[in-house]
Image (tube, rainbow, N blue to C red):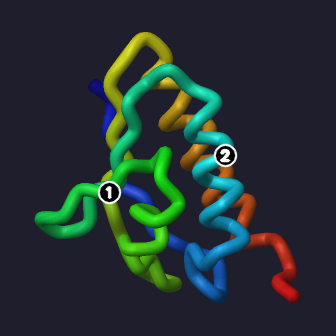
Amino acid sequence: MVSRQITIQNELGLHARPAAEFVRVANGFRAEITLIKGEQRFSASSLIDVLRANLDRGATAMLEARGADAEAAVTRLEKLLIEFRDRKED
């Protein structure tokens, strides 16, 4: 298992468009990937779950992955969340 704490930097948080991209990338890995916010766990492969996590700007969560490519999954998703910070939103 691999886990890392993440902080949402994107001005608008992890809203529909970046959440959909996050889920698309997460589904490219074999690992079971979970977002943990407080006591709640959300599947990173489900857009509904990622949106339910309500990850606004400044929110922190744990990104956890289990499986053969867990390290690669967490590294890629963490990088993706950082890249969202630099994108201008419509």
Q: Residue 11's spot in the image, x, y percent? A: 65, 87
Q: Is residue 4 visible?
A: no
Query: Left of 41 or right of it: where is 8?
Result: right
Amino acid type shown at disc 1: Phe
For marks 1 and 2, the one nearer the N-term is 2
Instruction: Check the image and report above or below for 3 versus 68.
Output: below
Nearer to us in this view, 32 or 70? 32
Q: What is the number of the mark on residue 42?
A: 1
Question: Residue 10, position in %: x, y?
Answer: 64, 77
Q: Is residue 69 left or right of residue 23?
A: left
Cα distance, mark 1 to mark 2? 15 Å
Instruction: Please state, as top left, top right, bottom left or bottom right, where the C terminus lies in the image.
Output: bottom right
Bin the neighbour count of mark 2 within 10 Å (Cα to Cα): few under 14, some 14-19, many 20 and up. Answer: some
Q: Secondary structure at mark 2?
A: helix
Give the residue at mark 2.
24
Instruction: Give the SS element for disc 1.
Output: strand
Report the residue at 62% width, 53% height from top.
Answer: 22
Q: Quadrant of the N terminus?
A: top left
Residue lying at the far left of the rendered structure: 39
| Numbered disc total | 2
Task: Give whichever of 17, 77 is nearer the camera.
Answer: 17
Q: Is residue 77 left or right of residue 66?
A: right
- Judge whether residue 12 can be spotted in this image: yes
- Identify whether 48 is placed above or below 35: below
Dividing the picture into quadrants, the one containing residue 36 is: bottom left
Residue for point 37% across, 49% down: 43
In percent of the image, x 68 and y 67: which residue is there? Answer: 18
Q: Which mark is residue 88?
A: none
Q: Residues within 10 Å of mark 1 (few under 14, many from 20)?
A: some
